[in-house]
Amino acid sequence: MLCATFHPDVVPYILGVKCPDPSDIDDQIIWRWTTKGNFEIRSSYSLLTSDSWDPNNAIWNAADESILHVLRDCHVSSTVWEQLLPSSLSLRFFNLNLLDWIMGNLCSRLLHTEWDIPWSIIFVSTIWQLWKSRNDLVFNFVMQSSEVIVHRAITWARYYSGCCPQRKRLVGPICEPITWRRPDTGWICLNVDGAVSIGSSTSAIGGLYRDHSGSWITSFQMAIGKSSPLQAELWALFIGLKYVWDLGFMTLQVQTDGKEVVTMLNAMHADRSTFPLVCVIVKLRQKRWMTDIIWIPREGNRAADMLAKSTVSSALDMILLHTPPSIAATSPASTTTNYQRFKEAPQFYNSPTCPSIDINGTDEMCSPQAVHVAMTLDTAYLRGSMAAIFSILQHTSCPQNIIFHFVASATADHHNLRYTISRSFPSLKFQIYPYDSSSVSGLISTSIRSALDCPLNYARNYLANLIPQCIRRVVYLDSDLVLVDDIAKLAATPLGDNSVLAAPEYCNANFTSYFTPTFWSNPTLSLTFADRKACYFNTGVMVIDLERWREGDYTKKIIEWMELQKRIRIYELGSLPPFLLVFAGRIAPVDHRWNQHGLGGDNYRGLCRDLHPGPVSLLHWSGKGKPWVRLDANRPCPLDVLWAPYDLLQTPFALES
């Protein structure tokens, strides 16, 4: 739409600006020639005198601005070094490559006789002053003379040397590696960074989530059009915060190497900032959770930096990576991926009345006597999946007749997933199917909650293609639930003569709210539900007839609606609306006891919820809050204690009294 209205060169700049929000503060007049938008006499003076520059000045000579050029070879830098260099070093000083130049001068034991200061200290101090001078010129339009730079370098070198008299003669540099900083126990850590191309100003962001032990949870990449470095850093922080809020984590530490960003966001009146992104970040932090934003050195943020720099410029939608990409996994600043460890569950056996699923030597995986359960597996929700499996086995009369069909991203570590499940459930019958998300990634539209945009959420659309053709009926379950009743009863839900699936229906819900005004105002689209009594139903608990699904080619029908959504925005809520468009009003009902839903809490403020009236066979923590996250944060909702007995994670949690 933007490309059809604006020139292609303009569109990236529009994309780099946050869209206005009704809750934002009123527009303000800002001074565009300072980074914070405040008027300064110095910047106005520089602006007024900017037309008087001398094109013949050596500082404007066209040269590649490499590190060596900035710190040694440009006109200003070389003039500074010529005033400082001892005669014994002048012959080779300007001819060395970068590494030899830095290490040779750092490790020098020469004492500068004019100032009685070790040359290595003068060298470091001068590099620092040259770098500061260069940034003063670029960002503040202030140019320092070589004499000023020399004076400041010697002053700081003398100060440092005087504070450490015992180190007049240095043995050599002592280097301590800077690595990723672990957050407190129970906290999630988000590292973010923004990257801007020097030539084109094309910008991208990246971020990764780890728990307090360093275990990888997930990461993201996204192109944001064209923006300044500061704007890119703010975008990275905003997108990262929004996604983790949607996931339901309640304690988060954000680490960034942008000092100015940290200063702006932690300022007393940050909510009145002239930057819209700062205001919206402050507002997001004021929700019912705990966040901490800290600065770390660039070396400790290298993994996020690599994620941002490796983003494809055309990837304007958020890309989620649920396994560490090679660029981050090999980063010196990233920790080795530590996988979650789970305890071994008790062994469960069939009761004497259970039927045998091994009939006439047929493959157990295809047995019609078995109860087939399908679930997705990923790192972020693995703990929930393990609890769900445990609860199913504990409450069924025929646990040895349960066969699990797990769907995991094709890029996930299937070997580790298989090992983790087998270690906790040695006798479990299961299969893991690789899911190539590339087929659906291009069809996913950004929803109101970024957690809903994960391609694995759409795997249920493809179950009939992934699971063996010999299996007719399957129970599909989300990972954020536990059963307290026999799953065989749920699996036996009658589907009637024509229904493809059964699910809990909620006809009291406002069905029209699941689709946009564009959908309902379209004469053709609004007739989609004309011949059926359409109600909202929960896709996290479904009984599916795979044979009928395949015969009706329902995967294709869902995809057709998703393709339309990419052209016309007809819904806002992730993978649910396409299911409603195809099946609403045509499903068999599942008793509400099999979906005590909404225990994840309020999606906006994270408030706790109580059980709905009636009997309970399945507890479902749908919504943004997850019980394992709140338990780890020591801020559980009352009903989270019902999930806790099924938690197999070896790291214990603590509950407040």
Image (cartoon, helix red, strand yellow):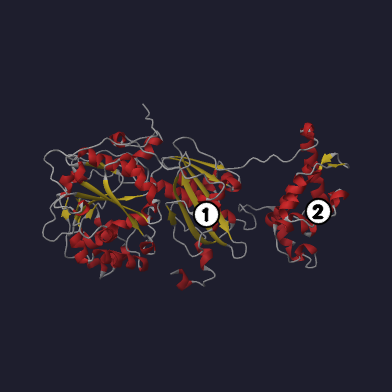
Q: Is residue 272 above or below residue 14?
A: above
Mark 2 surroundings within 10 Å by alpha-carbon count, few (fewer than 14), some (14 through 19), many (20 or more): some
Give the position of the C terminus as an image quadrant.
Answer: top left
- What residue does disc 1 label? 327
| Residue 387 x %, y % | 30, 40
Label 1 Cα neighbours within 10 Å, binned few <14 / some 14-19 / many ≥20: some
Residue ID at (43%, 51%) = 323
Query: Can you say which quadrant of the picture contains the N terminus?
Result: bottom left
Distance of label 1 from label 2 (alpha carbons): 35 Å
* Front one among 268 and 601: 601
- Residue 573 is at least partly visible in this image: no
Precedes in sequence: disc 1 or disc 2: 2
Q: Position of residue 421 (x, y in %)?
A: 33, 44
Residue toward you, 567 or 338: 338
Kind of residue at disc 1: Ile
Mark 2, secondary structure of its residue:
loop
Residue 139 visible in the displayed image: yes
Q: Residue 118, how many percent across, how many down?
A: 81, 40
Please state which of residues 604 and 324 is positioned toward the viewer in this rendering: 324
Which residue: 75% across, 52% down? 101
Residue at screen point 78% across, 41% down: 157
Tell me: 267 left or right of 475. Answer: right
Q: Indicate the secondary structure of the residue bearing disc 1.
A: helix
In the image, 132: left or right of 151? left
**To which quarter of the image does residue 626 belong?**
top left
Tag 2: amino acid: Phe
Q: Is residue 182 above or below residue 128?
A: above
Q: Residue at x 28, y 69 (%)?
A: 522
**What's the mark number on residue 93?**
2
